[in-house]
Every structure is written in structure tokens, then in C-alpha cells.
Image (tube, grey):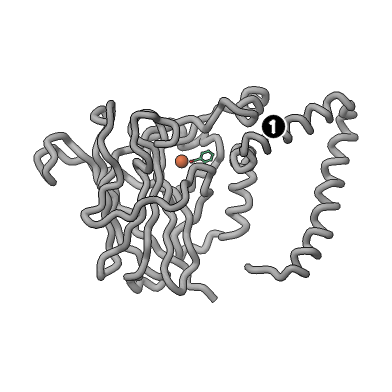
Amino acid sequence: MSTTTTEKGERLARIVPEALSAVHEVLERHRVTEEEWHAVLAFLTDVGRADEFILLSDVTRTSVLIDAMSHGADESATASDVEGPLYVEDPPWREPPVKIYEEYEGSDAGEVLFVRGEVTSADGTPLTDAVIDIWQTGPTGGYDIWDERQPEFNFRGRFGVSESGGYEFQTMVPKPYTVPTDGPVGSYLAAVGQHPWRPAHIHFKVTAGGHEPLVTQVFFPDDPYLDNDTIGAVKAALVRPLERHDGGARGLDAPFSTCDFDIRLRPTG
Ligand code: BEZ
Ligand code: FE
């Protein structure tokens, strides 16, 4: 829903005073001291300086709440999910056969994964102009931006679909990982006793003409953090089985996995 400048001003004038009243009520109920309040302000200052407000919104489950209110649970389209703070703008365009990574020191400990499916409109019509944008961790070391062994944009990339709306890309099975813990949000998690782990997942952004863009994530069964993701973003409809295959196919000596994930976009208007 797009809002005009006047509507935005009216929303601000209604919502901000109510939000502040709610904060004041909590401060009063707990008789919060000057020292404690100054510590809160210093924490928020640190969060801003460290560019961790999205992360704070995520770990406090605020992003999940906003996602649920913004996209609803309309089953004719693929469920949306939180974007998180680790998307990097302008990832490379990958031509078919799409492979979104280069091997790096230690990556041979991981397992190759082919993710495939169709991109359609809610009524099943193939969307042949769809563009898919993926980001995920490697099998070791987390995201490329944290791991010196990985080239820039490893396990990231954009690509188109086939003439029938189909797609397939080669990646590696991701692993559970912790959100960044070395900044102010990490101190907050430790202080409130919340663990920092996320279940393994692959992020998707999908766009096509005449359709609402979709931001989502795919998860895998049997992950130890499926029921207690630190950002609370797991949706049952987004948990997809991995099918295991023996080596000797697709030019691979080692066993590998496949995962099917069809994507349905909601028409605009
Ligand atoms: C992520 O999945 O990339 C992520 C989401 C929320 C906070 C930190 C990381
Ligand atoms: Fe992630």
C-alpha cells in the first residue's frame, strides 16, 4: 500500500504519540531510574553507530510481525519472509547453467545442492520474465562478507527463468549459523538470554512484471533451530525436503541433494 506525504504525516501524528505512551507506561510501571534510561539511550546510540537497527528489529521479532501484517497468509501466493540485514546490492548476473558459488578452502566438506522449480502467477500462468535473486551462507564460514576465504558475492546471484518459467541453480547445502554477536545487538541477546542461532536457509527475492515482488526464505527439515530460530521467521509452508542422490550423476563424483521450490507471485492491483 503506497501512502501520500499527507497520509504519512497523519499516520506519524497518530502512531508516534501512542507508541510513546506505551513506552512511558512501561517506564512508570518499572520505576525506571535516570541511570537505566541513560543506558537505554546509550544502547540505541550504539545500535545506530553499528548500523544494527535491522538486526535489532529482527531479533526482537518485530520484522516478523511487520512481515505478517504486510503480506498476510494468502495461500494463492508463496509465503513471504523477513529480508534480514545481509543482502548485498547488485549481485552478479548468472547465466545458465546457473551456479552461484566458487569452491573455496574448506567448501569440499559441504554437499552440492540443486534448487529448482517454476515461477508462476497465482493462477498458475508461467512468468517468463521473472528474475530470481539468491543469497545464502556457504557450508562453512557463513556469508561471504564474513569469510576471507570466499570470493566477493559467493553464494549470491541473480538470474532469469526459462521460456516456461522454470529455474534451477547449483549451490551447496547451507548450515545453521549465528547472527552477528560482536556488536550491541549481540550484547542485548546475551543480556536477555536469547541464543543467536538461525536454522539453515536460502534467501530469495523474486520479481516479475505486473506482480508484487516476493522476499522469502526456504528452510530444510530436521534442522535443530527450526522450532527456535532467533528471529522467529520459520513458516511451515517454507520448509522443503532435500532429496539425496548418489554420486556419479550430473558430473559429480560425490552424493548431492535436490530441493523443489515452486514460486507463485501475487498479481498487483
Ligand atoms: C539472515 O538470515 O541473513 C539474518 C536475518 C536476521 C538477522 C540476521 C541475519
Ligand atoms: Fe540468512
Relative depth, front residue between 50 and 16: 50
Count of marks overlaid on the render: 1
Location of residue 158 with respect to 253 vertically, above or below: below
Q: Mark 1: is the Cβ under 8 angstroms from ligand 1?
A: no
Q: Position of residue 105 (x, y in %)?
A: 27, 27
> How many residues crowd around disc 1 within 10 Å: few (fewer than 14), some, or many (20 or more)?
some
Dot 1 corresponds to which residue?
46
200 left or right, relative to 191: left
At x 53%, y 49%, the residue is: 82
Report the front residue among 244 and 164: 164
Q: Residue at x 13, y 46 (%)?
A: 250
Residue 164, percent from left and from top: 26, 69
Residue, far left: 248
Identity of the residue furthest to the bottom in this view = 269
Could you tell whether 223 is left or right of 5 in the image?
left
Regarding mark 1 in the picture, which secondary structure is present there? Answer: helix
Mark 1 residue type = Asp
Residue at image position (63%, 52%) is: 66
Name the residue located 47 percent from the left edge and 72 percent from the top edge.
267
Q: Quadrant of the C terminus?
A: bottom right
Q: Quadrant of residue 36?
A: top right
Residue 60: x %, y % from top left: 64, 38
> Is residue 193 toward the left or the right of residue 74 in the image?
right
Which image quarter holds the N terminus?
Answer: bottom right
Q: Is residue 41 left or right of residue 104?
A: right
x and y, in percent, of residue 201 in the image: 41, 41
- Which of 88 and 70 lies nearest the eye of the viewer? 88
Q: Quadrant of residue 172?
A: top left
Picture quadrant where residue 193 is located: top right
